[in-house]
Image (tube, helix red, strand yellow):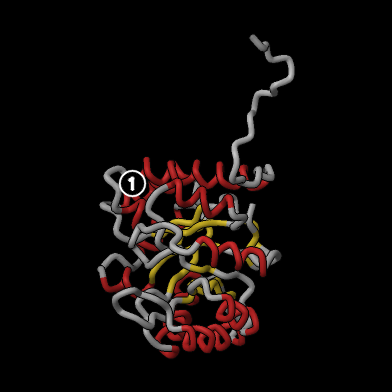
Amino acid sequence: MPEFYGTKIASRLMLGTAQYPSPAILAEAFRRSGAGVATVSVRREAGGGRAGPDFKILIQNLGVAVLPNTAGCYSVRESVTTAQMARELFDTDWIKLEVIGHADTLQPDPFALVEAARNLTEDGFQVFPYCTDDLVLCEKLLEAGCQVLMPWGAPIGSGLGLNDPYALRSLRAHFPEIPLVVDAGLGLPSQAAQAMEMGYDAVLLNTAVARAGDPAAMAEGFAKAVDAGALAHAADPMEPRDMAAPSTPVLGKAFL
């Protein structure tokens, strides 16, 4: 099971808590999937009128680790202030750091992201940075004090899957000891399995489950796919080859 900042998590699946049709369906999705972490967007929950004691109790009753999120922040100051609010609200030093740089793609601002990560780690936060799959950016985030990296698979909410498998494999190869989580863009369980087959430690998603016709069933599907992908990676899969290779030996074949 994955370990983040010294805390072991019971599942490699991390789920967001936004956009579900009802609190009951949200809770059922977590129950059926066994997800180990719930991400909570502090600003969006407040803006949507779901924040407050009732929502906080709902999240606490899920029985999983809580990862507050600075989603919707577009500057260093805004993200740092939101992180400080989240620490008071949820009593945790964990923070999923988002500093958006482009309104259409929701791509993070790499310069502001590194600066905010440095400020937060110096303030005692344990930062989970939402980033692109850029190798140099990831190196800068580690230098800033992050001990986890969360590269995107594709833009948030797009469901496109893993847009650049080469870049994601490169990150895994360059940072073999760093916990890596594919965050954003997954639309199908098969895409989550692909990430796990690459050796990633976990996946984080929200829209693909919350907006499914049956969110709880989709959450369970993602959980099974994550387990299958992790098992396949641990089994040391065969390398692909250009030519066919018969699985049945020709030894003993009858010649007529």
Whether residue 76 is situated above or below residue 139 in the rendered picture? below
Secondary element type, mark 1: helix
Residue ID at (60%, 57%): 201
Image quadrant where one finds the C terminus: top right
Can I make out residue 57 in this image?
A: no
Can I make out residue 126 in this image?
A: yes
Identity of the residue furthest to the top in this view: 256
Would residue 130 be found to the left or right of residue 142 on screen? left
Looking at this view, is 155 or 24 the one in front?
Answer: 155
Q: Position of residue 246 (x, y in %)?
A: 63, 29
Residue ID at (48%, 83%): 110
Looking at this view, is 187 or 117 the one in front?
Answer: 187
Residue ID at (51%, 68%): 151
Mark 1 surroundings within 10 Å by alpha-carbon count, few (fewer than 14), some (14 through 19), many (20 or more): many
Disc 1 marks which amino acid? Pro
Residue ID at (44%, 76%): 98
Q: Position of residue 17 (x, y in %)?
A: 38, 59
Q: Position of residue 109 (x, y in %)?
A: 43, 83
Q: Which residue is mark 1?
A: 215
Whether residue 120 is situated above or below residue 147 in the rendered picture? below
